[in-house]
Image (cartoon, rainbow, N blue to C red):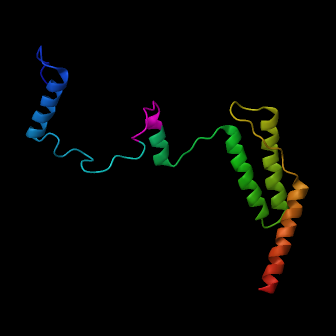
Amino acid sequence: MTERKPPGVPFESWVDKQILDAERRGEFAELAGAGKPLPPGTDTTYDELWWIRQKMAREGLSVLPPTLALRKEAEDTLAAAYAAPSERIARKLITDVNVRIRDMMFKPPPGPPLGMKPYDVEEVVREWHARRTATGKAEETA
């Protein structure tokens, strides 16, 4: 702790003197991060949850509103259904995600609207068959 500011000395001058004295004593010589660039995100305005955001970034986590998370899950599930090894697995994947979509449609959580409807299982299965046929034909010609 430094001494108190003497009366009659402007605050800026007194602070500058304290910094210069500390530099002369070498108190800034071996600080962690000296000579390194500032971490990303330090040039923004103050954020009360900065430490939570940094922790989540370090841990590779992200938090989406439930509706956006379900949209992402539905897209991933559709892609997985198209790549499924059997029709039964493709049907199961789409049926399971449709249950979650319907639940969210009837009991919407706070946040952005879901903006999607359940997938037509038969249409997905037709597309699954079409892709399998196209892949089979492409393999036969190759």
* Rendering quarter of residue 6: top left
Residue 99 place in picture, x, y as percent: 81, 44
Residue 45 place in picture, x, y as percent: 43, 34
| Residue name at image x 91 percent, y 57 percent | 122
Q: Is residue 124 among what the camera can see? A: yes
Towards the viewer: 87 or 8: 8
* Rendering quarter of residue 25: top left
- Quadrant placement of the N terminus: top left
Residue 54 place in picture, x, y as percent: 45, 42
Residue 75 place in picture, x, y as percent: 73, 53
Q: Is residue 1 among what the camera can see? A: no
**Magenta: main secondary structure:** loop
Towards the viewer: 20 or 124: 20
Highlighted magenta segment, given as a residue range: 42-52
Does 59 appear in magenta?
Answer: no
| Residue name at image x 84 percent, y 46 percent | 118
Does 48 appear in magenta?
Answer: yes
In the image, residue 105 sits, relative to residue 34, either above or below, namely above
